[in-house]
Image (cartoon, coloured by chain):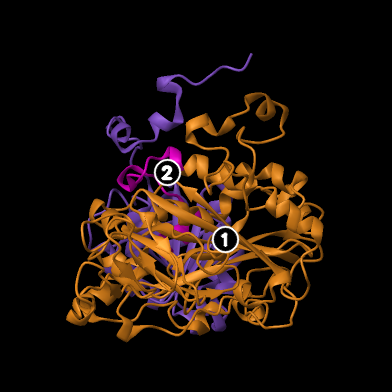
Chain colours: A orange, B purple
Amino acid sequence: MLRKEVNELLTQTGPGTPTGDLFRQYWIPAMLAEELPENDAPPVRVKLLSERLVAIRDSEGRYGLIDEFCAHRGVSLWFGRNEESGLRCPYHGWKYDYTGQCIEVPSEPEESGFCAKIKLTGYPLVKIGDVLWTHMGDPDDRPPLPEWEFALVPPEQTFTSKRWQESNWLQAFEGGIDSSHVSWLHSDGLKNDPLFKGAAGNKYNQADKKPFFEVVQAEGGLFIGARRDAEDDQYYWRITPWVMPSFTMVPPRGDHPVHGHFWIPIDDENCWAYSYDYHPVRALTADERQAMKDGHGVHCEYVPGTYRPLRNKDNDYMMDRAAQKRGDTYSGVKGIAMQDASLQESMGPIVDRTKENLVSTDNGIIMARQRLRKAVTALRDDGVTPPGVDPAHHRVRSASILLPREDAFIDTCRDALAATPGVKQTSV
Amino acid sequence: MQRRPTLLDSCARAATAAEARFRVAYPNSLQRASLVIALDDGAETVVRAAAQHDWAGARFLTYVEPVSAVGAGPGGAIVRGEDGSESLLGDELGDADVVVMIATSERSAEAASIIGTASFARGIMTAGCVFGAGDAADSGVVTALRPYASVLVVAADDDYVMEMLTALRA
């Protein structure tokens, strides 16, 4: 249960809101690099943190994220002509550079310098890995660029997709740290999904549906460990890191690529789920990459030409009750990503947390909410930089490991939970 | 034949903010019986502070010592209530839905073992809360509680007890 005022505090991310200010402390994914594939590519509408923007890549390859609407008469610059190092409004020809600075007002004398007085809001857009990242906060407090391992490994070792989720970011993110649902909702995935099946550790998941949990604070967020009994007086641990505000990483399985998510608010009733897969020390195989493109693992199939999932609320997620009855899927919805999203969207755009009945195994969620609330209020009241801004906090990994029963994972697994270039993930 | 979604069946309609307003308004759970037990002196301070707030039936206790008398059965320990009165753990566990064990030191091992074993024997959910972050984890208190807590939380701040109990409707 969460009080109404705290629920509102954490779910509202528009300009001027405390949690909106929190998100504006970070470099966050704005879009996939593939959406601006070449210089002078068509502009792309981007809505982030309840701000309507357009992204451009100009004639010189410079990226920018600027206010969607022309300062003249409010025309959407999605209709703009991206040419000759600027985006020109097709209505009266006003032209803007990649920072949002107006560089031409054809109706005014060039010597008047009028255009210098027109400036659209503009945010930086930086390509790291498959993602274009932006920082929407105060330029004077701009942090160093992000250092997430999935974005820094060579291109052949990583794959990132995104999908539109029609719910508030918080209920989507909370699914990413809710380890106890996996044994139920995704039970088919361990048997069938090409990016999950075959790992030695899967047998522990399948044998024990009631894991024990351990939640430990980390500098950047949390580590959430789920342990199950294993042979020889050991526990099988699956350890999930969360780094503020919304980065999560699923514990690996065997030598499969490691995957996880970034949950980014579009507005208060929609978010982007960025889903990455990477291998720290080898290239993804052609089969792995194809499986990701086909929507396996944490990825999904799309309505052609969009980032909207093929299974969405307009077609009831293609619910297949017969497949559910046969045991092909547990919920009747195909695919791990949409199994999650279908249920999270069913809660309504912003779930009313005053009605929920949490239990002890939800302590990861409870502590994440507390850390978020404290970070939001510390920033609001005292200007304290929140956890997760420092790139040192980005260098984390998930892990799956067999440990002696007396070992505390947070001590024993320090190396396994750190992203070290050239070192393989710790996985069973 | 595949049944096609129609209005009220449709997820698109059902998942709107407008429809969310029609969620039936009623208390969808009964009062829980939560036992919060301090396992050591440092934990008692935390538990006493938490007990000063209003709760929906939570009871706050401190572990005192084991009892091995014949007939004591599982849960053979004496616990002390907020008013200083002592009772048998086994009696306190009677109607509990969840037992939350609070610990700050390795000295909690004996208490955790007795309370955890008694709770498991009765099918009662257990949670453990260790305060002191890294120091507490290093001290072995986490290891001491691990076998007896279905969920174990290592928290830096004492106020996490309040957060957790509020979230659990204690």
For the image shown, how many numbered marks are present on the structure?
2
What subunit carries mark 1?
A
What subunit carries mark 2?
B
Residue under label 2, please give it.
B95
Q: Position of residue A315 (x, y in %)?
A: 52, 30
Judge whether A295 appears above or below A156 on screen.
above
A74 on left or right of A85: left
Judge whether A409 appears above or below B127 on screen.
below
Mark 2, secondary structure of its residue:
loop
A96 on left or right of A176: left
Q: Is residue A123 within the magenta segment?
A: no
Residue under label 1, please give it.
A213
Judge whether B91 appears above or below B81 on screen.
above
A207 on left or right of A142: right
Mark 1, secondary structure of its residue:
strand
Q: Is residue A280 visible?
A: yes
Mark 2 packing: few (<14 Cα in 10 Å), some, or many (20+)?
Answer: few
Q: Amino acid at mark 2?
A: Asp
Q: Is residue B80 visible?
A: no
- For the residue pair B7 and B161, the one nearer the viewer reads as B7
Q: Position of residue A40 (x, y in %)?
A: 50, 66
Circle number at residue A308: none
Q: Position of residue B141 (x, y in %)?
A: 54, 76
Q: Amino acid at mark 1?
A: Phe
Decide: marks 2, 1 in contact (CB < 8 A)? Answer: no
Q: Disc 2 vs disc 1: which is toward the camera? A: 1
- Magenta stretch: give its range: A345-368
- For the residue pair A367 and A387, the one nearer the viewer reads as A387
- For the residue pair A307 and A383, the one nearer the viewer reads as A307
Mark 1 packing: few (<14 Cα in 10 Å), some, or many (20+)?
Answer: many
Residue located at (59% from left, 48% from top): A337
Distance of label 2 from label 1 (alpha carbons): 24 Å
